[in-house]
Every structure is written in structure tokens, then in C-alpha cells.
Amino acid sequence: MNDKDLSVRFFAVEALGRVGDIAATDEAIKTLTKLLNDKESFVRISAAEALASIGEKAVSDGVIKALTKLLNDKNIQVRSSAVSALASMGEKAATNEVIKALTKLLNDKELSVRFNAAEALGRFGEKASTYEVIKALTKLLKDKESEVRHSATVAFVYIAISIEDKAQANQLSLSKFNKYISQLEKALEIIENPENNSSENEAAFLRRSLLVIKDKRKALFWNSLLKNPFIVLPTAYLSFLPSLWFLLLRLKPISLIQINEILKPYEFCFPKELGGVPVKSRDLLLFSFFKFRPRVLDAWVKKNIPSARERFELKKTVGERSIHIPVAATLDNQDSLVVMEKDLKPTFNRNRACLLIYGEGGAGKTSLACQVGRWVMSDDLDKRPAQHLMLPVLIEEELRLKEHQEDEKPLLEAIQGQLQDLIDSAKAIPEELLEQLLRQRRVLVIVDHFSEMSEATRKAVNPDSPNFCINALVVTSRLDEKLGRITKTTLHPHRIQGDRLSSFMDDYLSHRGHRDNFTDIEFFNACIQLSKMVGTRNITVLLAKLFAEQLISSTNSQDLPNNIPELMLEYLNQINRDVVEDKVDDRSIHKNAKILAWKCLEQTFRPIPITRENALINLGDDADNRLKYLENRLRLIETIGAGKDEIRFVLDPLAEYLAGLHLLEFFGNQQQLWQQFLQKAAETEDAPESIQGFLLALRDCYLAKGKQVNIPEIVAKELENLPNIGNGGLVIGNYSFTNVYFIPLSCF
């Protein structure tokens, strides 16, 4: 670094920049700081860029001082690089001197300098939300360069969010509120101007934050008014009404909801002499401050908890998962033996709680989501992830969307309907109350099967939207969903490890009340049989449960299945045995179920709903009775949709295996059909991750059937060799799936 040769210094700095924070040693940072004063401009540029790549680890008084000095450098690129370096260091670099210097650079004649300066101030967030910065950024919104205007707009979004945080934390005075609101309104007016060509999403974010800030100012105003002993209004008016509302808040808080509904329609206007300003009766009566206090919402939730607990369990999806056996999982990249309610407390204590449960079919995602729904209703604080009670709402069907509709209204309507049913209310929940329950996290919204939902529904469930009012959300998906820029907790359930298999089976059988039916020898022989069947030390929760149910119904170990496809078919036989009248033979059940399963997977190779009409067409003669038998007698499928015109399989892995068996029988040795199938699979969206479950099921079905199926040799060979696929991905025929690591049959 101290070499006299210019090229040596330059390439040394370049090398440090490429390794980023790995180079963040005290010696390296000290040397780079010294080179910020190098006589050659491109060395100063490279040193600043190297510090930018190191980021927050490079922050020190010396570095900040040296970079601040470069903000006045004559070289354009030097100034721009210094700004970028400070931006990369985030709030740690946001000293008063830096903010003052960056604010000055908003008037720099060079485009890149103005752009980077606006971006840096935005990244500083709360520390940069000063009156002077906002005023300078407002001027920049009218910059002749569109890139600069966009950078200023984004900066305003971040600063508005930080002001909102200050407002929520009650850290602003009335005068500061007025200053900030005035500047933000000016900024919004410029941003909304069509000639500005600003992003509507960014404008929406700014509008939402401004609305929150105004609401907090109103609350502060009324609080100040009530505390001021020199108010002009009559003493009785100012003392009696607030005292009345406060008394009701303490003694009968839920009555405030009823009063709010009574007062809501009424609005008055001051005389023209006084400006003719309209005023809501709730504001005139000093009621607005009290109407949706946490105590009020808690009282409403507590009143409806008994009904919610009962009716939540009556939901088919929840009732079928009444037995919850905790399994190992990865929580935010941290492995845990089991995930319990206490592990989710940090998530549910946030202002916006978002939990994503993702994993393969049969991993127990829905079961875990239902258990979270039970936890949030617990009276025991130690067994509840949130500080307050919550009502769980389960969304598992497509939303009723109009054509090209992408707003949140259909989602809110679905929540409103589910909540009404949950609390067994004759009337719909008022929209104003519903929004407050959602915003203040008194309602937990569970969206199940998110990855299998239509694109339109997925867009409606958008936590990144500025109007999204759901602040307690659980999403289950087969994929690790982005869910926008919000902070989310990820929960990835694991397969049951071999050393915990017997423990899981023991717990499950005990909960079912059948553990005492088996001696220890019989029980462990059954566990050994399960291990032989899957050839693994890891198994999904669903497969373990299905095997346990087979064990309960079997008379001896010889009745237990030897492979997974056989387990699925035996499951069909088992539930068909319970049918008393007008029983259909097992073979017919298998045939009908396989056909329907393939139709549910045919389009996307993932289990999705199909129309009832499509199902009837493919079932052939007496199709309606066949479908009713599968739905009403066996509970294999369920009718969904607003018009009850769609069906889907209750268990996705079952559908995948039945579809795999059907494909082997239907395609046979017809190579052309296999080639068309493989080509479509390779072109499927999000392949291979999105269809990995079906491909694995297909392979397992072939290996289980062995010589009974006559498929093209090239396909058979590749299916047999799937466990040996390495970094090159899956290749079948002329079609390939890259970057997928298939689990051997022995690990399924």
C-alpha cells in the first residue's frame, strides 16, 4: 500500500475491494483510510470503493472524517465514491457533519453525486429525518434528471417511514409534527404530479406513512388539549365527556365499540362564520381517542375466544390435524430440536409479525400452522407466543377476485367472512373494527397452500403493499417465498430423524389412545418395518402418521405395507373398509382416485384444484356418484370455491403418488407421451423445486412396481439412477433440471 509505484498501490486497493468484508482487518482499514488522501484521484476512488465493499465493519472516526473530507474533492468520481462508501455504512456513519455535507451535495452539478447523496440520506433513515434534509430533498424532486428524482423519491419513502416510527414512539412535538407533515405533503404533491413519472407504489407508501403521522398528530393534539388547564372550551365539556369515556374504558370497554357504531354516521358543520368545517360527531364528543384502544380490542377478543376455540377445531382442516407432535425444524437458519410457542415470541412481539412455514408436501406445515392458531388463543401467557389473545382466521381457498383486481379488498372480505363464522356472529364485523383488529394484531391470518394458489390470489396477499393492514400473518408454502421487503420469520420443518422415529410413533399412538394395544416388541418391530419400507433414517410427518394408522388397523405385522406407493393404496383400502352401505370395491376406488389425482397435477405437476365439470368428464359413466363417494364417504377430496365448483385432494402427497401410479399405467411404453411429459416438466415455472415432490413420487412408484410396468428403457434407466445425480442436476432423455439434488429413495 505504501509502494511508490502507482500501479502497485492501485492493484492492492483493488484486491482489497474484491474480497469485501473479509479484508476488514484493522490494518487494512487503516491503510485504506490513509490512501483516501493519495495524490492520485483513481487511488482515492479505489480506496473509497474498497471501504464501501467492507461496509459497516469499516466504520471508525478516522474513516468517517476522511470520507467526509472527500465530499469536497474536486474530482467528480471521488465525491461520488465517497458518498457511496458512507451510504454502505448505514446509520453508523450518520454523524451531523456527514448529514450536513451530504445535504449540501444535493445541489452538486454532477448527476451521479446528487443521485448517490439522496440515496445515502435515505439509507440513514431516522437520523436524516431533519427539517433541513427534507427541505433539500423536496427541491431535488424537481431535478431535471429522472434518475435523481427517483433517488429523492425513494429517500423520502425511507425518511417518512422513520418519521412514522418516531411518531409511533411518541417522540415528536406538535410543532415538529406540523413541520414534517407540511414538507411531506409538498413532497407528495410533487411526486404525484404525472409529469414527474414517479412510481405509484412509492407514492402509495408515502401516502400511507403520511396518514399514520397525521393520525398520531391528531391524537397528540387531543391529548394536549385535555391536559391544558387554560383551554377555552367549557369546563364541563372538557371534563365530563373524557371522564365518561375513560370510565367506560376501565369498567366496560367493549361498550365503546357499540357507541362508535352509533356515532359513526353523524357529521356536523361549523357555521360559515367559523369556516364551515365539517367535523365528525366522534371528534366533537372527544370520543375518537378512546374508541379502539388496546383495552377495547382485548375485551372484544376475550368475549369471542370461547366460541373461536370451539369453532376453530370444527374446521375440517384443523380437526384432521388435532394431534400435533412437535418435530425438529430450522427457525431463521437456526436448527432446533422442536419449535414451541416460546420460540415464536420474538416474531409475535414485532409491530408486524410474519411467519413463513415452508417445506415439502407432508412435512407438517398445515399442522404446525393450525397449532400456532391454537397457541394464540391460550389463556396461559407462557403458552402463548403473543402478549395478548388473538383470533385465528384460516384462508385456504382462492379469493373471490374480479378480473384484473389486485387490491386487498377480496382478502379483507374473506377474513371478514371467516371471522364472522369463527365467532358465530349473525352480523358481519364492521370494516373499521376489522381493520383495527388486523393492524393491532388481535387477529392472526393463516394463509395455507400459498404456493399452490393462483397468481391473482398471491398478488392480493401482498404484505409489501402500503395498504396491507394485516400485521399478524402466517403463510404455508412449498417454496421459500419472498413476501416482499418485510421482516419475516422462516420456519422449515424437518423430516423425522431415525433416532426420533420410535419416539414420534410412541407419542402419536399415545395421543390416539392405541399405544397400549401393542407390546414393546410389537411396537419396535413395527418401527423396524417402517425403516425397511422407506430405507431411511428420515421420514416425513405425513408418512409416519399414515403408517401409524395402518398399524392401528392391522391384525399383524404381515399386513403392513412394504413401500410408499403400497402405503398410499393401503390407506385408501383402510378408509374404504369403514364404509358400511353401498360400498365400492377397492380396485374401483384406486382407479377413480388415480384419474382424479393425475388431472389435479396434469397442468402444473403440483396438486391444484380442478373444476368439478373436468372431474366428471374424466371419470366417465356414473361420474357424479363416483365423485360423491370419494368426497362424502372417503373424504379423499373436498369441494371448494365460491360456487363450490372446484375440487382438490385433502392430502397433496397422496395425490402425487396416485398420479405417479396413473402415469406409469397410462403412458406405458409410449415413448412419445413420455417425451412430451418430460419437456413440459422441464418448462414448468419454478422447476425443479416446485415439482420435485411429484418427480420423486413418480420414481418411487416405478421402483415399487418394478417389472410390472413396461416403460421406455431410457426413462426407466434414468428413474433408477436418480439417486446418483450430482451437481449436474436431473437429466432425463434430452431434458434437464439443473441445480436440484434429489434425495435417494432410501432417504424418502
Image (spheres, helix red, strand yellow):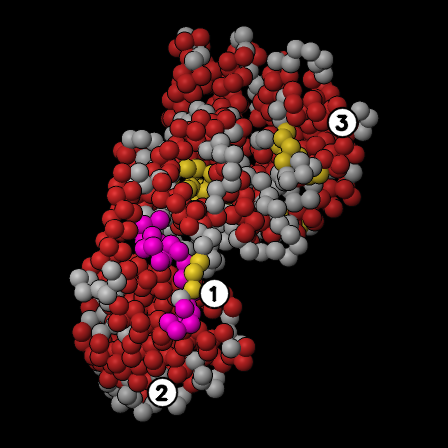
Residue 406 screen position, x and y as percent: 58, 56
Q: Residues within 10 Å of mark 2 (few under 14, many from 20)?
A: some
Mark closest to the chain's N terminus, 2 or 3: 2
- For the N terminus, the image quarter is bottom left
Residue positioned 47% across, 57% down in the render: 467
Q: Is residue 522 in view from this perspective?
A: yes
What's the magenta region?
271-291
Mark closest to the chain's N terminus, 1 or 2: 2
Instruction: List the single residue furthest toward the right.
Output: 621
Image quadrant assignment for residue 79 = bottom left
Q: Residues within 10 Å of mark 3 (few under 14, many from 20)?
A: some
Is residue 280 rendered magenta in the image?
yes
Q: Is residue 1 in view from this perspective?
A: no
Q: Considering only vertical position in the picture, is 746 above or below 6?
A: above
Element marked by disc 3 = helix
**Cα distance between the residues tagged 1 and 2:** 27 Å
Instruction: Kindly identify which residue carries mark 1.
Output: 204
**Cα distance between the residues tagged 1 and 3:** 49 Å
Question: What is the three-letter code of the residue carrying label 2?
Answer: Asn
Residue closer to the observer: 26 or 11: 26
Q: Nearer the viewer, mark 1 or mark 2?
A: 1
Residue 449 screen position, x and y as percent: 54, 41
Q: Nearer the viewer, mark 1 or mark 3?
A: 1
Instruction: Kindly identify which residue carries mark 2.
Output: 107
Element marked by disc 2 = loop
Element marked by disc 1 = helix
Question: What is the three-letter code of the residue carrying label 3?
Answer: Asp
Is residue 559 rendered magenta in the image?
no
Residue closer to the observer: 505 or 738: 505
Instruction: Kindly identify which residue carries mark 3.
Output: 624
